[in-house]
Amino acid sequence: MTPDPLHIWKTQLSDDQRTQAAEAFFADASLTDFHRAAETFIARQKNFRPAFIKKLPVAKRAFYLAHLPLSPD
């Protein structure tokens, strides 16, 4: 049985690895729709406005994305 990506993200990657992966995600210009979804998710989790998140430097957005609590729901 193959472990699901969420399980790997939560249990097998260090904080630094998750941050690096999130930075690579935001650096990929072909994923703009996914960037917006991630920024909306971050904003909801942190109780920030999406426009505020969008204006943050990529490193800060990546940090937030890498350290948010995720559930399989």
Image (spheres, rainbow, N blue to C red):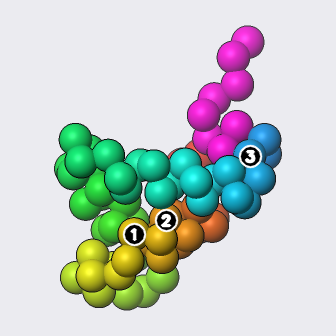
Visible in this render: residue 7? no
How far apart marks 2 and 3 lie (CA) works out to: 15 Å
Residue on which the image places disc 1: 58
Which span is picked out in magenta? 1-10
Residue 18 image point, x, y percent: 63, 53
**Kind of residue indicated by mark 3:** Leu
Between 15 and 47, the one lying in front of the other is 15
How far apart marks 1 and 2 lie (CA) works out to: 6 Å
Q: Residue at x 78, y 41 (%)?
A: 12
How far apart marks 1 and 3 lie (CA) works out to: 20 Å
Residue 28 image point, x, y percent: 32, 46
Please tell me whether residue 17 is drawn above or below residue 15 in the rendered image: above
The kind of secondary structure element at disc 2 is helix
Q: Earlier in the sequence, mark 1 or mark 3?
A: 3
Please tell me whether residue 72 is drawn above or below residue 16 in the rendered image: above
Residue on which the image places disc 3: 13
Residue 57 as seen in the image, left or right of residue 59:
left
